[in-house]
Amino acid sequence: MKNVKFKKENLPIVLILILSAVLNFANLTIEGYGNEYYAAGVKSMLVNLKNFFFVSFDPAGFVSIDKPPLGFWIQTISAKIFGFSGWSIILPQALAGVISVGLIYYIVKRSFGNIAGTISALCLAITPVFVAASRNNTIDNLLVMVLLIACVFISKAAEKGRFKYIIISLVLIGVGFNIKMLQAYMIIPAVYVVYLISRAVPVKKRIKHLALGTVVLVVVSLSWAVIVDLVPAQYRPYVGSSTNNTVMELILGHNGLERFNNSGMGGRQAPGEFRNTNIYGTQNQRGNGNAQNGNWTNRQKTAEDSQNGNMANFSGGNGNVPEGMKLPEGSSGGRGAQGGGMAGNFGGQTEASITRLFSKNVLSDQIVWFLPLAIFGFIAGAIVEKLKFTFDNRKKLDLILWIFWLIPEFLYFSYTKGLFHQYYLTMMAPPIAALSGIGLVSMWKLYKEKSKNITWLLLPVSLVANGLVQLLMLSYYSNISSAIKAIIISSLVLCFISSTLLIVYKVVKKGNLEKAGNIKLGKALTILAFVGILITPAIGSGAAINHKVNGTMPSAGLELLSNNESGNFMMGRGSGGSGNDKLVKFLEKNITNEKYILVVSSATSAQDIILQTGKGVMALGGFTGSDKILTLDEFKTMVKNGEVRYVLTGGMGRGSMDDIMNWVQKNGKAVSESQWRNTVESQEEKGYSDFNVTEYDKNTDTKYNYKNDNSGNNSGNNSGGGPEGMNSQVLYDLKGSVK
């Protein structure tokens, strides 16, 4: 009988794990290479151990990916085993998503029982941003998995006071640092607070354990960075997105302070990232027109401007597309579709505030589906466990663990003015899911008890509040299909009616639900109400199975249903690579012994060619085109030595290589477009290059006029971002230009 009981008890989590696997793996090949910048890096890392260790972006080892190595090492190993493909490099993240669902079940069940663990696992499995991140080669869900394993050990450390457990937990966070740098440290407040308030060992011993553990954490975190920085620059790739070719500066700058403020270190902004700036920016700003896989962030606009104005912000809204520009089938120009959905990029839509994650932007639809339930759930859990300063049991400590994981991240995403991706929100999914499971079980306990206070109201009120937030999300996406709207509204009506009946039933029974019959009906109503709030996020997550998510900014939810594909566009390129076919054939035919088959301004222009050829392409300015990697004299030496021959000017750049590109235009021989440019591509670019936009700054009463001028040699001077940076590209042959 024990075996039968065991199987019955574990059947729900088995089904949930299967559901998670379906959401993460089904039809995964539609995602292509996902983020092509990272995919090109993995292909380059397969070339040799040097590229592998230094996470080189290109096969020739010119510049590195601007992230730490561990996540991409895992992807490279997967590609080595299964062969390089989009599926093989996304596989580790999809698998990490399923494992994370199992981990949260284990952690919550360990303290709060099987039902709480099952609910938590289900909530995590169907959270849209969690599914989107699992179906992409961004490495955030690998980090989530590692941090959840760290939670297993910090929970044991707090319970038993064993030094080895706190060390293992902090080592794992250090491992997480080598996946996503400082993002891993967002769990540090939870880990330190939980261990400090635990009662298993005296406080002096706890402090000593944490002090020693911190040393271990720092050593593990910086191990790779220190090794790389100790290697002379001439023997390794340039550290991408750093200002001084060191990983330490990358940690503190691009992947550090820039995540918290507007200006960052050197003013860089990564392609596709959101910066909540005063939208019209600084002098010299030509619009932050960075792209990766065809996704832009131009001058940020308010929601009203994005919806009604011309297409100065290329990431969406109902802007006018310049003649000749081609949007992919099913796309509405990026982040917003005609007739509803999100308009424009997040950064310019919503001021930093406590309500940001509930407002009309591209963040809310990804993460808030169970947030009200989690908040009420923590309150209920605290009441049931009589949470106060004496934290003398595992349940109390785990409650603190989850709330201290959630609060710092909620505040960060609500108030940060730095740059970020919406898929970073997957970091919030585990604590929200855990507190939802813990909370629902705790609220049921309060509801069924006979008590004179009103704490029993937490159950129906939390379900109604959660349903109202989901209804608010639906109001932001007016253009989804009528059938889906009907299903969502019906499910929310089910939630509201069931929750109302819970209140009526409790009042009628005068609080006495201890009798079996009363308990059964109360349970049934609770289950129906909970099912009502599961439907919408499940639909949003399931959308990723049929609709390709954005490679650079993966997201699911109603936004994906609204836009069909969440925003892949830039003249029809960025995910297919067909625009470079003729160029690749030309290079393969004419290249001889050059180390680099092509020089381009940034990784955006290089990644597709690397994926097609597997050969060295020099991204002269690194990721965004802002890295100052070579001087003009160094570049001339490379030309003289026969390391480079062909240079493609124009494209996305940030001005760091203007002197080199100007020299190329003066000394190189322009190659006829008929030899290397696709006809359709040329027409699209002409349509773009002729486009003219006027933008109005309400704050300064100033008009900005953007006109892309491709006449003469001006194209080379427009290497900044935005409309002036996406100029007509010209291929130059430098053979014989340096004697």
Image (tube, rainbow, N blue to C red):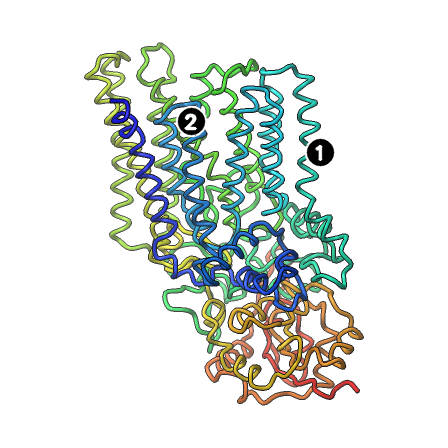
Q: Provide residue 458's location: percent of width, then percent of height.
A: 38, 23
387 and 588: which is toward the camera: 588
Image-based side of 212 in relation to 731, left or right: right
Of mark 2 and mark 1, the one earlier in the sequence is 1
Q: Which mark is residue 1?
A: none
Q: Quadrant of the C terminus?
A: bottom right
Local crowd size for mark 2, using a 10 Å CA cut-off: few (<14), some (14–19), many (≥20): many
Q: Quadrant of residue 121?
A: top left
77 and 529: which is toward the camera: 77
Residue drawn at 58 percent across, 67 percent down = 604
State the residue position of label 1.
215
Residue drawn at 53 percent across, 40 percent down = 146
Residue type at mark 2: give it. Gly
Q: Provide residue 592's location: percent of width, then percent of height.
A: 63, 84
Residue type at mark 1: give it. Val
Q: Quadrant of residue 28?
A: bottom left
- Alpha-carbon span between mark 2 and mark 1: 35 Å
Q: Which mark is residue 377?
A: 2
Vertical order, 64 against 664 (above or below) = above
639 and 481: which is toward the camera: 639
Is label 2 in a helix, a strand or a loop? Answer: helix
Vertical order, 112 against 677 (above or below) = above
Residue drawn at 34 percent across, 10 percent down = 451
Vertical order, 349 against 662 (above or below) = above
Please identify, in this view, whether the residue under mark 2 or under mark 1 is nearer the observer: 1
Local crowd size for mark 1, using a 10 Å CA cut-off: few (<14), some (14–19), many (≥20): some
